[in-house]
Amino acid sequence: MGVIGLDHVQLAMPRGEEERARAFYAGVLGLIEVPKPETDRGGCWFVGGAAHVHLGVEEGFAPTNKAHPALLVDDLDAFVGQLQAAGVGFAAGRPLAGYKRGDIADPFGNRIELMQRFDQ
């Protein structure tokens, strides 16, 4: 009788940029694109493990800087190496107990936090 989980996060993107979204979210991050139930409004949906990321077209698009998804990764250092090889910048995050973390931006400037969880 209340919230039981998180289904997905949605980020905005400019109209007509689906190929750039696919190149980044599938090609760089390694997420799998899944079909959208409606295709007339643009955008793309991706899945990786339990993470579901939807990108929707927003007229007058502006990237998010504070609001962001935080994606869990199993080996942050190795993943950052792959990202940097693909030309994606990474900024290490502030310490947080139980995590190693940092930020990247998608091709549209949306902030994405990457987190590796450690047992305490």
Image (cartoon, rainbow, N blue to C red):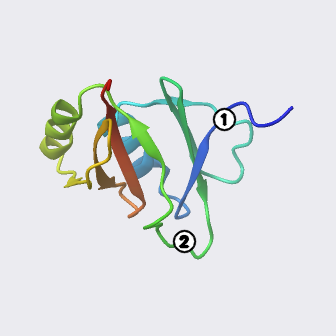
Q: CA distance from mark 1 to mark 2?
A: 23 Å
Residue 87: horizontal and vertical position, in percent?
A: 17, 50
Relative horizontal placement of residue 60, taking residue 98 as reference (left or right): right
Q: Quadrant of residue 79?
A: top left
Comparing 66 with 31, the one in front is: 66
The residue where tag 1 is placed is 7
Q: Which residue is mark 2?
A: 61
Residue type at mark 1? Answer: Asp
Which residue occupies 43% across, 67% down?
65
Q: Tell which of 37 and 8 is nearer to you.
A: 8
Q: Position of residue 25 (x, y in %)?
A: 40, 41
Q: Identify which amino acid the numbered label 2 is placed on.
A: Phe
Q: Within 10 angstroms of label 2, few (less than 14), some, or many (20 or more) residues?
A: few
Mark 1 and mark 2 in contact? Answer it, CB < 8 Å. no
Q: Earlier in the sequence, mark 1 or mark 2?
A: 1
Quarter that holds the C terminus: top left
Closer to the camera in the image, 73 or 47: 73
